[in-house]
Amino acid sequence: MPSTDLDDFVAMSAALTGFTADFLRPALDPLNLSQAYFDQATARTAGQPATLQTLLTAYRAVQGQAPQAIADALLETASASPSSNAMLAQSIVLLWYFGAWYAPLVPGAPQPTTAPGAVQVVSSNAYTHGLVWNVMQAHPMGFSELTFGYWSTPPGPMSQFGVNEPTGGDR
Amino acid sequence: MTTYDVVIVGAGVAGNLMALELGKAGKKVLILEAGLGVPDNRAGYMDNFYLSLAKTPESPYPPLPGNGAGGKPLFPLPDPATEAAPRATVLMIGKKPDQSYLVQDTHGSVSNPQGTAVRGLPFASTYERVAGGTGWHWLGTSLRLVPHDLTMQSTYHQFTDWPVAYDELSQLYGEAEAAIGVSASVAQQAPLESAIGLTYPPGYAYPMGPIPTSMVDQAVSTGIGTMMIAPDAPAHPEQYPVFVTPTPAGRNSEPYQDRRVCAGNTNCIPICPIQAKWDPTVTLGAALDTGNVTILNQAVAVDVKVDAQNHVVGIDYLSWTKGEGGKIQSKPGTAIGTTYVLAAHAIENAKLLLMSNGKQGVANRSDQVGRNLMDHVLYLSWALSDKPLFGYRGPLSTAGIESLRDGAFRSFRAAFRMEIGNEGWNFAIGDPYTSATDFINGLNFSGQNAGNQRLGGLALVQKLNEIYTRQFRIACLFDQAPQPDNRITLDPTLTDGLGLPRPKIAYGLDDYTLQGFKAARTVCSAIYREMGATEFTTDQAKSVADHVPGFFAFDGFNYQLYGAGHIMGTHRMGTDPDTSVVDGNQRSHDCENLWIVGSGSFPTVGTANPTLTIAALAIKSARDILSKL
């Protein structure tokens, strides 16, 4: 069966975020955040210089590469003047990291004078499933499923937090 | 009309504890609460928090402080003139009155060229006006004051003494710790006896065992051991010990009062999702369960009415609702009791007293109502450890450095306690948001991305993991000097949605307090050096310090002013009716059947977070009322 736009969105998101596709869209997925984010990104970029579709087109051109190469290509990390597509890719990372939509920066515009803020938190579930908390081997502030005293000992390895580590082991 | 034994204004820490004591004793109590009542459960407040764009202390609580919930932009903030019970919020600091409930004449430039005081600062602490009050988002820190906090005049020839004996306060602390449910170990606090004179009654044990310390606490404690430092060298070469102690906390380490143990949500502020942290709604529930306590929500007290003998004869209030299109409707009522308690927190207590009696004021023969407004002003420093210490885990703070809370230096500069944070650089720079956007968008607001790198994939994960797991911060909370010209008055023209005058603030920091900032900066930097950590505390731009409200320059450093949310001093207690508003029982010197309670009664800040002392004094006041009813 050919992959759908949503399949490609999840695969692209995995490369961009550094997490596994299975973690972003588990087989059993009552929250279905991938669909919510796909819809959010589609609606927010309609009529913009870069749309989710232009980004997916760029993804399909490099999808056979290794995850880090895909991320670097889409984010144009080697470029001094990233395109609209690359800035949309940044917002896709932020969407998964914070469960919130950040308006993409604009190529050539002056740098912001304050740290960029989200325009909207997609949902409470989106906040409590932001990936940034996994990156720090912690839990969302205000949403702990851990037990009393866990904070006095070190957290488990990165591999327990859904990160797509090449070695799959502890760092 | 029902006549109550006691009418209490405000359902917060002090009001609810008093209602419980009085209700248990069979007294009929009416609580007037300005804001909305306690919701059936906290799910709605949690959603408000989750969906807020700025997760400030007030973000969960109604009316929503313009935090972008529901897809609305963060700014402009709602106009306080459209709310029946508006309050100060963090986002309002430095804003003009159309976006700030407190009317603050902040001038724009605050630096004094002589460097000895700064005036025109915005007051940087905030509070809630809902049932439960600001105690919804207290941290849980339950430190006791130390003996010299009560004797600043007689010991250090500064300010004034408290009209309360430490032995009595010590007993009351035990009762307050039971009422709140404090987790701590007397043995762990023992090193503070020789350092700062902290003692407990013989045989005392806290209600619950201690909260375990975090990896961050352990890293700081191991990194500095007991370090000797001279914070005021070279002028004052005396050395003092610096060491870490676990912080007594109003969070459950065992099931207590039918509440769960702490699960380390790292969210005591703005809201504990599971009520493992005590908050005043716990006590309100117990008070209502006595069958003797009634609460009237959405009832804003507007006038404390007195007769010719200065006897309080009633409190007028406005019951309000908000209808279609946010239109406020209100109807007047009068609460009648034998005795009256104002427990609306420092700013609202003072405002109510000042606007009573046709704005001539009540209980203000001393002219001290509204004066000596104090905050636990705060210096925030932050650093990256040389190895992971895994912040963002556990309660927001589990340990601190208390050893510098007392010493001979208090004769010339403010003492401070040091709170070690478990939330990385969340307080410091708004992380995890700021660092992530830095490395994703190629910016450098965190100071960690000097090369404006843009990263993605596993490279991003590894970079951010390396940063977040090593972030920590220390906040120093100062014993800010009481100053009569730091005060709230009634704004002559601006009103809230009920047409009531808004609080106008005049505020600044004096040299005694500022010298404390200097010492704190010295100590924090020394700690980071000793640990091998790299400090990132921002020395703000001079142009910002001189011109942006909330920033100031002093002694060659450009500070951001932070409040601790600890508002004190607007109806100070004392023995002399000419220089104080209430006595040692928080009873008005002028009105024999009026008690004015809460941290507004504190004549000096002291060196402990105020909630436990508010609770202890509330219990004392309830006993005083019972002895007279």
Image (spheres, coloured by chain):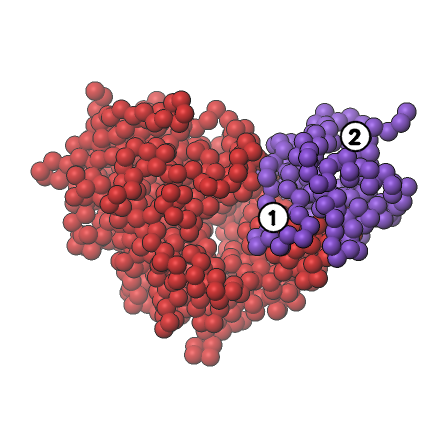
Chain colours: A purple, B red
Q: Is residue B431 visible?
A: no
Residue for badge 2 = A6
In the image, what residue type sits under mark 2? Leu
| Number of numbered discs | 2
Above or below B471: residue A101: above
Q: Which mark is residue A116?
A: 1
Q: Which quarter of the image is occupied by the N terminus of chain B?
A: top left
Q: Is residue B314 visible?
A: yes
Label 1 resides on the chain identified as A
Res. B587 image quadrant: top left
Res. B478 image quadrant: bottom left
Above or below A109: residue B297: above
**Where residue B239 appears, x then y in whole percent?**
49, 73
**Where residue A43 appears, x then y in whole percent?**
67, 31
At x 30%, y 45%, the residue is B503
**Where residue B544 appears, x then y in whole percent?**
48, 62
**Where residue B106 appears, x then y in whole percent?**
36, 56
Tell me which label, 1 or 2, sits earlier in the chain: 2
For this rendering, which residue is in front, B291 or B345? B345
In the image, what residue type sits under mark 1? Pro
Q: Which quarter of the image is occupied by the C terminus of chain B?
A: top left
Do discs 1 and 2 share a chain? yes
Label 2 resides on the chain identified as A
